[in-house]
Amino acid sequence: MTQVYTKDFEIQCSPSQRTWIEISQKIAALPLPGVPIRLILTKVEGDTLTFESSFIDTDREPVWSSLLDINIRQRVSNQPFVAVSIIPTGVRAEIGGFAGDATPSTNLLATACDYLVTNPNAVTASDIYFGQDNVLYLEGNLICQLLLGNIGVIPEKRKNIAAIIEKPKDERFLNNVINALNGLRAVGGINIDPVVVTGGPVETACTYSQYGNASGEFKGMDELMKALDVVENSSARAVALMTTLEVDDKIRQAYYRGESIPNPWGGAEAIMTHMLTNFYPFTAAHA
């Protein structure tokens, strides 16, 4: 059974040792409860570093290297010139912590380079996307793998995109999603195949950690992985996830009023897509 956990832990690391090679080795030496899929440095006091981390416990083997591995590139080139812009969701970023509100600043930065790699929520606003043509939209875990030197990126036009829809309680929801996908096919000329409906619910409760970061509690990950197995056996190499994210109504209303709280959906979305891209060879976004 696949389980996702979020826990915090501490390591001792003096300022003179604070390279990712040193830090990752100290983390790897701990009795970790699974494969780390998200790491957040939450506090530094003297030599003590406190991390909040999400782990996945599963029998499956990751398709990429661990976030704790680094592969320093032996050859570098500025042709083409590539920059990376990361604006994490769910940590109260002034710009880019919401739905697509970093698009203007991302596009401005993109004018200074050949390609700009960025994470999904920086430039996507539900149904609205206005990223420049040289902005490469890449899931967060894969950006980490790129920066760690474990993968490379080749710009291309996606020929085929898959969609996974959580089995809904109300069939009208499924009809609405299918109609939206058909609209994309007809108007955008996008090939969306396969479209997979999960065999059961994929339950996600959006929460906040003790450090105030957006997080989530998950059930039904095995149902999601069964659907992903179908996608893996297709020609699609990108997938959109459409699953329910439950947010307490008081938190949602406070967020809409503009109170200083992180995007309540962002952390759960990030953990879910990080899980996916650790175990499947394609990129993803939660719609």
Image (spheres, grey):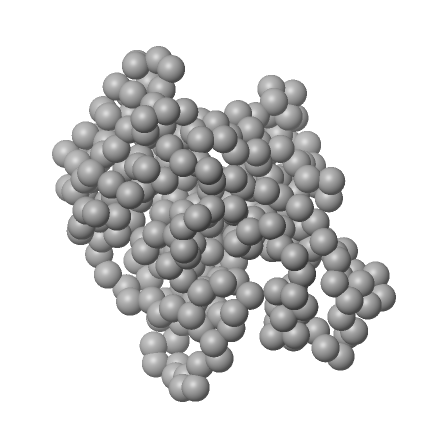
| Image x and y of residue 137, in percent | 38, 54
Q: Residue at x 72, y 54 (%)?
A: 9
Q: Residue at x 20, y 38 (%)?
A: 194
- Whether residue 143 sits left or right of residue 95 in the image: it is left
Q: Is residue 83 visible?
A: no
Displayed quadrant of residue 25? bottom right
| Image x and y of residue 45, in percent | 83, 61
Q: Residue at x 62, y 33 (%)?
A: 207
Quadrant in which the C terminus is drawn: top left
* Residue that extends furthest to the bottom in the rendered view of this protein: 75
| Image x and y of residue 231, in percent | 25, 43
Above or below, comparing residue 284 to residue 171 in the picture: below
Q: Is residue 282 visible?
A: yes
Query: How many marks do you count on the picture?
Result: 0
Above or below, comparing residue 218 to residue 48 in the picture: above
Q: Residue at x 73, y 44 (%)?
A: 211
Q: Nearer the viewer, residue 198 or 142?
A: 198
- Whether residue 237 sits left or right of residue 147 in the image: it is left
| Image x and y of residue 27, in percent | 65, 63
